[in-house]
Image (tube, rainbow, N blue to C red):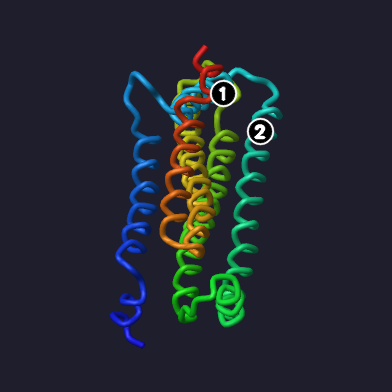
Amino acid sequence: MNLMDRITLFAPLDMAAVGLLLFFWQAMGWWVERPSARRPSVSIIMAGYRREWMRQMITREPRIFDAQTIGTLRQGTSFFASTCVIALGGLLALIGNADQVAGVARDLTQTSTPVVVWEIKLLLVVGFLTNSFLKFAWANRLFGYCSVVVAAVPNDPSNPKAEGIATKAAELNIAAARSFNRGLRSVYFALASIAWLAGPLPLISAALLTTVVIWRREFASRSRRILLD
């Protein structure tokens, strides 16, 4: 079966649902990272706190607290990266046994759908999780760079190089957090893409719900109000 034959197995509504999911994924990421100045997202607000953290770190002795905090952040990225690898392994095993998935679906829906359709639907989830793993792995490495730069900040606050190196550490910290947040958004939309197994309308509903959840957490959550107060 060639590519065109596989495409014809999906209805136009399926194509529209997948396109809408991808659009919401990209649009939400752009909105979170480039909000208006009047209504910043939690990610942008936290970037300011990260810069302040590195400024305060210059005069903190000893810097055990800073090292522990960065270590905790790296542990979080490692956990999510490992989780993505496990999930990818399970999905690839499921794709390898797509005949059983098709059999279960046939019993539930009383319709006959080619196995390749289920494989392609699962590959969408695989794509999101793969992107998540790459983002988490890169975030982990950036937090490692940040810890090295933090260690390079002179112990003497009067040293003219201290503020400049601390600023570099802050920007690396922000870049790592940005990559981590992108990985999380991919996980959210990977979960939403599972709804495609039930059809295009459930996929559209899941994409809308996921977008609303992310928007609320970034722009209308209680934690955001606390950060702004």
Q: Which mark, by number, is residue 69?
A: 2
Residue at the extreme top of the image, as rendered: 229
Q: In front: 132, or 19?
A: 19
* Residue appearing at x 60%, y 76% in the figure: 107
Judge from the rendering whether residue 97 lies leftward or rightward of residue 114; answer left or right: right
* Residue appearing at x 57%, y 19% in the figure: 56
Report the quarter where the N terminus lies: bottom left
Name the amino acid, label 2. Thr
* Residue appearing at x 52%, y 44% in the figure: 180
Q: Which mark, by number, is residue 23?
A: none
Residue 175 quadrant: top left
Residue at the extreme bottom of the image, as rendered: 1
The answer to whether 6 is drawn above or below residue 161 in the figure is below
Helix, strand or loop status at disc 1 = helix
The answer to whether 225 is drawn above or below residue 79 in the figure is above
Residue 191 quadrant: bottom right
Residue 108 rendering spot, x and y as whole percentages = 59, 71
The answer to whether 197 is drawn above or below residue 191 in the figure is below
Whole-angstrom CA distance, mark 2 to mark 1, is: 20 Å
Name the amino acid, label 1. Ser
Residue 147 rendering spot, x and y as whole percentages = 59, 39
Q: Earlier in the sequence, mark 2 or mark 1?
A: 2
* Residue appearing at x 46%, y 46% in the figure: 182
Helix, strand or loop status at disc 2 = helix
Contact check, label 2 and label 1, Cβ < 8 Å: no
Please rate how many residues cluster around mark 2, counting C-alpha atoms within 10 Å: few if below 14, some from 14 to 19, many from 20. Answer: few
Q: Which mark, by number, is residue 223?
A: 1
Residue 21 rendering spot, x and y as whole percentages = 39, 53
The answer to whether 88 is drawn above or below residue 57 in the figure is below
* Dot in front, 2 or 1: 1
